[in-house]
């Protein structure tokens, strides 16, 4: 049977992709951020997952504001990189894992977790920036990806608890997949940031660290955080952190924190990175 081996949470700020693509990672502004990812890149190369389920949000690229699924899973063999207005990032297409994706879709829906099935879509910085941060700049991505999109761009987004429960349902699905794949689950977005309104530029590093502590050691408490608290404490775009709860729900009830790195500022965000290893304690009951 397939097995979820680990989880990664990481921000997906678009400026990071631009820094990579334009050869600016060695500039003083960017050095601390990218230095923070060196240990996780090494860990990733050593861990070498067979497939990654990447939980991200589309930013009105694959899905316009005419149609916004709350949860959507890509079941294609390949995903092209979206042009977000500055040309496509110079990245290889993202290979899919259609067989696992269809199994996930079937298992989730029969598990009464309805999810939109997407046969074709492009992927934007929500997915490609984490890929760059995890795998650097390979000619080909080292493992296929199952993209799982969550609406956090138009109210109402799903609750943190709903995302946590989706992670648990993903765990049940992977545990019944008749392959031998070692599966990585990635939650992206956040941490605190606000891109609009009177509090534009808001960053709340202390709250973010408490969120990470809860996510590791008391995920039920993290899942109970309300939309209003995200808005008040982490800014209007801090709600992206609910996607990290999907990742956490798919892991063991107890996890080992392998690595954490945070950095302020990265564009207008508090950048976060968290690597969690399954402890063998088994899934949430
Ligand atoms: Fe985002």
Image (cartoon, rainbow, N blue to C red):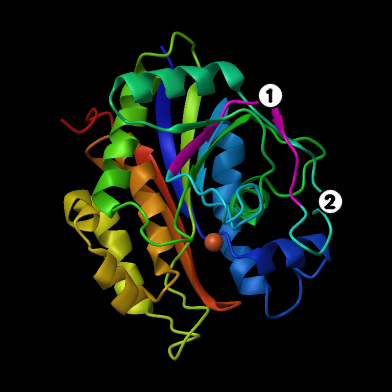
The secondary element bearing badge 1 is classed as loop
**Residue at horizontal 50 percent and vertical 85 percent from the top:** 201
Label 1, label 2: how far apart the Cα atoms are: 20 Å
The secondary element bearing badge 2 is classed as loop
**Residue at horizontal 22 percent and vertical 30 percent from the top:** 281
**Residue at horizontal 41 percent and vertical 74 percent from the top:** 236
Q: In which quarter of the image is the C terminus?
A: top left
Does the rendering let one see residue 36?
yes
- In the picture, measured across the screen, residue 249 lies left or right of residue 244, that is left
- In the picture, measured across the screen, residue 242 lies left or right of residue 29, that is left
Vertical side of 87 occupied by 3: above or below: above
Read off the residue under disc 2. Answer: 90
**What is the x, y in percent for residue 60?**
61, 56
Q: Front-most of 150 and 96? A: 150
Q: Residue farthest to the front?
A: 66
Quadrant of the rendered image holding ligand 1? bottom right
What segment is highlighted magenta in the picture? 71-82
Read off the residue under disc 1. Answer: 77
**What is the x, y in percent for residue 77?**
68, 24
Q: Front-most of 229 and 256? A: 229
**What is the x, y in percent for residue 142?**
69, 33
Quadrant position of residue 129: bottom right
């Amino acid at each position: 049977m397939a097995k979820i081996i680990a989880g990664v949470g990481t921000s997906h700020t678009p400026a990071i992709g631009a820094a990579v693509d334009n050869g600016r990672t060695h500039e003083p502004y960017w050095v601390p951020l990218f230095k923070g990812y060196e240990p996780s890149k090494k860990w990733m190369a050593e861990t070498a997952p067979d497939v990654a389920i990447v939980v991200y949000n589309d930013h009105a690229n694959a899905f316009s504001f005419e149609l916004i699924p709350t949860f959507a899973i890509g079941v294609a063999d390949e995903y092209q990189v979206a042009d977000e207005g500055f040309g496509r990032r110079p990245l290889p297409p993202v290979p899919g894992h259609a067989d696992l994706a269809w199994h996930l879709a079937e298992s989730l829906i029969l598990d009464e977790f309805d999810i939109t099935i997407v046969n074709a879509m492009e992927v934007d910085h929500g997915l490609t920036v984490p890929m760059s941060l995890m795998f650097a700049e390979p000619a080909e991505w080292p493992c296929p990806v199952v993209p799982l999109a969550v609406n956090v761009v138009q109210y109402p987004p799903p609750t943190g608890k709903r995302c946590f429960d989706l992670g648990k349902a993903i765990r049940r699905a992977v545990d019944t997949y008749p392959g031998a794949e070692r599966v990585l689950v990635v939650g992206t977005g956040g941490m605190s940031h606000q891109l609009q309104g009177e509090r534009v530029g808001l960053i709340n590093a202390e709250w973010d660290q408490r969120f990470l502590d809860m996510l590791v050691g008391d995920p039920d408490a993290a899942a109970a955080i309300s939309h209003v608290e995200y808005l008040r404490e982490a800014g209007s775009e801090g709600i992206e952190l609910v996607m990290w709860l999907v990742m956490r729900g798919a892991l063991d009830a107890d996890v080992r924190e392998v690595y954490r790195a945070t950095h302020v500022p990265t564009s207008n965000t508090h950048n976060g990175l968290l690597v969690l290893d399954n402890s063998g304690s088994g899934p949430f009951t």
